[in-house]
Image: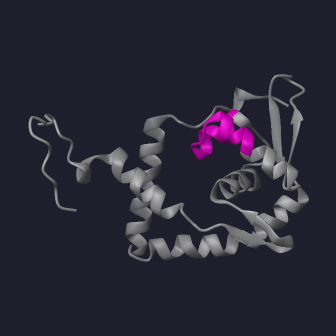
Amino acid sequence: MKKRNFPPGVEPRNVINLHDFLPYRIHLLAAKIARPADITIEGGIVIRARDWRIILQLASRGPLTGRELSSMVGLDAATITRVVQRLGELGLVTTRVSSADRRKQIISITEAGARAHDEIAPGRKQVAEGLLECFSAEERVTFFTLLDRLEEHLHDEPSDDDWTE
């Protein structure tokens, strides 16, 4: 996109080159990758992108707290609460109070949620594979190694002692 002229007297200093600004590039890529249209599954249930991210985490990792989900999917606590409530109303997840810490809710996928996951997952895997087609096999390994290194550097994974059962 061509740079436009600023109004008279406006002269930003320390302008960031967006092409080389990692947070912007990662955000832009994530937005493009994660913008699938709503998916309608068996029974006419509409699964939105946010719903899918939570279902995916619960299917991949097992029961989680809202705080853990928030960290893993990049949504704030209030949004997690709303999405989990919606998924609960659809019968795709269930919640219970943690026996170790009554202030925490443990969120689990239900049998219907697992079926929804299994219905959606093959198509999402296909999309992911399509995204990686631009890399050779060696480049894929390097790409994921670099992503792992960046994630480790950020120390963003919730610890196992966030809840105990």
Tell me the quarter of the picture where residue 140 sits.
bottom left
Q: Does residue 84 appear to the left or right of 68 in the view shown? A: right
For this orientation, the residue located farthest to the front is 8
Residue located at (38% from left, 75% from top): 134
Q: Provide the major secondary structure of the magenta segment.
A: helix
Residues 27 and 141: in front is 27
Residue located at (66% from left, 66% from top): 38
Residue located at (84% from left, 66% from top): 115
The C terminus, quarter of image: top right
Q: Does residue 145 appear to the left or right of 164 in the view shown? A: left
Q: Say whether residue 132 is visible.
A: yes
Looking at the picture, does residue 125 appear above or below residue 143? below
Residue 135 position in % (x across, y down): 39, 73
The N terminus, quarter of image: bottom left
The figure's colour scheme reads one colour
Q: Say whether residue 109 is visible.
A: no
Residues 8 and 96: in front is 8
Residue located at (75% from left, 65% from top): 46
- Total numbered labels placed on residues in the image: 0
User: Which region shows up in magenta?
Assistant: 67-82
Residue 107 position in % (x across, y down): 81, 42
Check residue 119 for magenta coloring: no
Residue 108 position in % (x across, y down): 83, 46
Check residue 79 for magenta coloring: yes
Looking at the picture, does residue 95 appear above or below residue 30? above
Residues 41 and 98: in front is 41
Looking at the picture, does residue 90 appear above or below residue 120? above
Residues 13 and 118: in front is 13
Looking at the picture, does residue 69 appear above or below residue 91? above
Residue 128 position in % (x across, y down): 54, 70
